[in-house]
Image: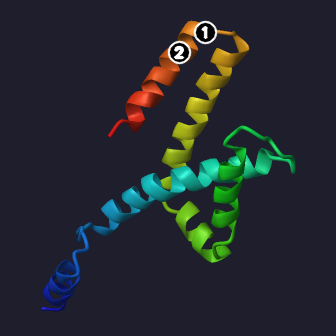
Amino acid sequence: MGKTFFKDFFGSLGLNIHEYSFEEHDQTIAYSLSVPFASTLVFAACMKKQDAPGTTFRKHHDIAKGLLSEDDYLLTEILMNPFTTGQVEKIRQELKGLLALIENKDTEGLQGFLKKVRHNIEE
């Protein structure tokens, strides 16, 4: 009955309701939060204090500041999710491939990579 009450209540507010098992929840959190969090943390770990006019650097900097304003326990809980390791491994593999393209000055390969990335973000 409690589940029905909350589902009806939040539904009446126009909120989207998703039902997940604990494992599905952890997988979704790892994908939707761990990937951007890890990417932002790596960016922030590599950055130095410097202006970069005419770029999106400031936007990325602001995202990193926002992320790091979160509670450390919350960040730890999200990053210690059992499915985060697999997601971060995907980041590592993509970075490894991108680095190889850059090191080899593989213009055609890089264009293929950019095409894949653009396809990934299409709505």
Q: Secondary structure at mark 1?
A: helix
Indicate whether 72 appears above or below 56.
Answer: below
Tag 1 and tag 2, C-beta contact below 8 Å: yes
Left or right: 33, with 66 as reference point:
left
Residue 97 is labelled as none
Whole-angstrom CA distance, mark 1 to mark 2, is 6 Å
Q: Residues within 10 Å of mark 1 (few under 14, many from 20)?
A: few
Between 95 and 119, the one lying in front of the other is: 119
- Residue 19 placed where, x, y %? 23, 69
Would residue 11 appear left or right of 114 to someone viewing this image?
left
Number of callouts in the render?
2
Q: Is residue 115 above or below residue 19?
A: above
Tell me which residue sits at (31%, 60%) in the image: 24
Picture coordinates of residue 25, whole percent (x, y): 35, 64
Question: Is residue 80 at all visible to an observer of this figure?
Answer: no
* Residue to which mark 1 is pinned: 107
Q: Amino acid at mark 2?
A: Gln
Q: Quadrant of residue 55?
A: top right
**Which amino acid does the dot numbered 1 rest on?**
Thr
The answer to whether residue 108 is above or below residue 2 is: above
Q: Residue visible at 44% across and 25% down?
A: 116
In terms of depth relative to the viewer, which is nearer, 28 or 6?
6
Q: Which residue is mark 2?
A: 111
